Image: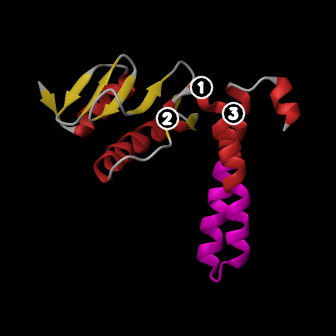
Amino acid sequence: MVVAHSEVVRAFVRGENAEGSRMFSENGIVYSYGHHFPIAIRTAWGYIFNKDGYSSSTAKHKNYVLYAITNHFSEVIHLTGCNEGYVEETYRENLKEIEETMAKMKRARTENSKERHEDRINFLFRQNELLKKRYLKELFVEKL
């Protein structure tokens, strides 16, 4: 039986399988439009969320999922491709984005814009702390 996106997301959070018209969850993973694009993976400690974009409809699916999982668990790690093989790459991408966003914040003209940039920088720092906590070995962390 095909269910609404919200039901697919609720089933995913509960660890159940569900199928919507363009979104489904199975075996602890929620997908958009098929197995080629995992949105998030449910783990024992929280969630791995796919930080990649794809299309406007997949962006909507991602928003449904992100809203649901951030309301249930504080540990949501955003990884490139939702793939644990990209931990180091994601960590370095986050560092680069922090640097770029800091430069944008210096050029920002309004307080609202500065606050938005500051929020993004804080988010990226928190993400890198979660990546270190969950994945990175001491040797790698010392290299950085």
Say which residue label 2 marks.
81
Q: What amino acid is found at the position of numbered circle 2 in the picture?
A: Gly
Q: Quadrant of the C terminus?
A: top right
> Of all residues shown, which one is farthest toward the bottom?
109
Instruction: Specify start and end residues of the magenta stretch as a single range.
Output: 98-124
Residue 103 colored in magenta in the image: yes
Residue at position x 74%, y 74% from top?
Answer: 106
Residue 55 colored in magenta in the image: no
Q: What amino acid is found at the position of numbered circle 1 in the picture?
A: Gly
Q: How is the image coloured?
A: secondary structure
The x and y percentages for residue 17 are 28, 20
- The dot on residue 118 is none
The x and y percentages for residue 124 are 66, 49
Residue at position x 37%, y 20% from top?
Answer: 15
Which one is nearer the viewer's eye here, 130 or 35? 35
Q: Are marks 1 and 2 in contact (CB under 8 Å)?
A: yes
Q: What amino acid is found at the position of numbered circle 3 in the picture?
A: Glu
Local SS, label 3 = helix
Residue at position x 38%, y 39% from top?
Answer: 65
Please, what is the dominant secondary structure of the magenta stretch? helix
- The dot on residue 85 is 1
**Quarter of the view holding residue 28:** top left
Q: Earlier in the sequence, mark 3 or mark 2?
A: 2
Q: Are marks 3 and 2 in contact (CB under 8 Å)?
A: no
**Quarter of the view holding residue 9:** top left
Which one is nearer the viewer's eye here, 115 or 52? 52
Say which residue label 3 marks.
88
Local SS, label 1 = helix
Are there few (<14), some (14-19), or many (20+) residues within 10 Å of tag 3?
A: some
